Amino acid sequence: MDSRAADPNRALTAAHYGPQIMMVRDTPDSQQTSSTTATPRRIAIVDDDPILREVMAARLREAGYAVTGAGNGEAGGELIDAQHFDLAVIDLGMPKLDGFGLLRRIRENRATADLPVIVATSSDDRDSVDRAYRLGASSFITKPINWAKFSHLVQFVMRAGEIERALRAAQAEAVSASKMKNGLFQVLSHELKTPLAALVGLTGVLAGSLKDRVAGEEAEQLDYVVEAAQRLNTIVSDILILSKALAGRDRLSLAPCSLAELLEDSTVGLKTLARQRNIKLAVHIGSNDCLVHCDQQLIRQALRKLIENAVKFSHPGGTVEIWSQAGEDGSQALSVRDHGPGLSAAKLKECLQPFIQDDMSYARPAGGLGLGLPIAQAIAEAHGGELTCETAPGQGMLVTIRLPDRDANESRARSAPRHFP
């Protein structure tokens, strides 16, 4: 500090704090332990005023903390780097290295980046407080110090720091687990795809060759084997699509494609399913066809999933509508609407997570793993876009894949993989 006389704390005489100061000087840090805890929390005090530093240390030790002090920012940085602390209290105005420099050093060091820091400053120095917060300060105290409030502030900041560290650790663990899950999806899906393709092909050939040679229960069992192989192949294919979308933009094969062709191609193979359920597919294509820059295969798969869901959950005799619409900002919206049972907001939130259906019981009317909406959402986000859903119980559902124009797509899409919680 350059102006010690202006600080009331610095003007206090040693005689007034004599007993406390003598206690601090005569008792080494290594011998300062709390009577109520075996491992007291450790606090570093960095201040160039020895009287204030020692009075603060005495107050904290009386509260059961282990305290170590330093007289300038440079010595404080070396101290904090060398030892573990649960909290640091630093003065902003110090020689050699001021509090701002020390705070920056603490935050740039991975070992101390999460250390809670209280900065000390004069009561009218708001600019310094704002600057300290930008550098990562946890809280601040003003001089002259209100010691009763200071004690509560220390407890609060340390507790908040513990909660923050626990949350970050949990987040890191969740991200790691999600990465491992996504990697497992890719490996298992690829390993299963080849034998499954052979299984589907061979069971189809076998069913064809034995068609006229088996009957009754044996024919029914053979049909079941063929159907089960095809269903398993569909599930593995869905997981492969999902893992590719989650891998991010780097895995996309981007090229301009016709929206009209995209909408028409998305219904191929689903018209039979729609006829079986007495559902009409209504594709609305505008007079002016547009080009959209996307991974055509993935967008087609996303639309197919949305259309398939709409057909499965529509009431017999209903209509599923598919259309596109250009936005004023150059974006393109690809929409699918059904008039089925709809979903509540809570159920919709669940269904946007992988492997969840509105009804996951064995008696549910529609099979599958509940990957339709999550696949479409992951594909839209991999393109830098979004998936929006409008639904309510008894009012059907409108699902829209909104793709940005090419320039916005380049700036918004991220190559880092997306992770589901």
Image (cartoon, rainbow, N blue to C red):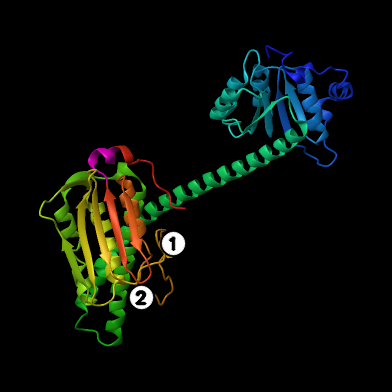
Q: Nearer the viewer, residue 240 or 47?
A: 47
Residue 22 visible from this viewpoint = yes
Q: Which mark is first along the chain, 2 or 1? A: 1
Residue 350: mark: 1
Q: Which image quarter holds the N terminus?
A: top right
Q: Residue at x 83, y 31 (%)?
A: 32
Residue 324 located within the stretch drawn in magenta: no
Secondary-structure class at tag 1: helix
Q: Residue at x 25, y 58 (%)?
A: 335
In the picture provided, is 36 more to the left or to the right than 41?
A: right
Q: Nearer the viewer, residue 72 or 231?
A: 72
Which region is colored magenta? 404-410
* CA distance for labels 1 and 2: 18 Å
Asked which quadrant contains residue 404, the reply is top left
Q: Residue at x 87, y 21 (%)?
A: 16
Percent coordinates x, y for residue 308 in the rendering: 27, 66
Say if 8 sits above or below 202 in the image: above
The reply to whether callout 1 and callout 2 are in contact (CB within 8 Å) is: no
Q: Which residue is mark 2?
A: 365
Percent coordinates x, y for residue 203 in the rendering: 26, 71
Percent coordinates x, y for residue 118 in the rendering: 66, 30
Q: Amino acid under label 2?
A: Pro
Q: Amino acid under label 1?
A: Glu
Say if 167 sits above or below 273 in the image: above
In the image as oriented, which residue stretches furthest toward the bottom? 216
In the image as oriented, which residue stretches furthest toward the front? 124
Disc 1 versus disc 2: nearer the observer: 1
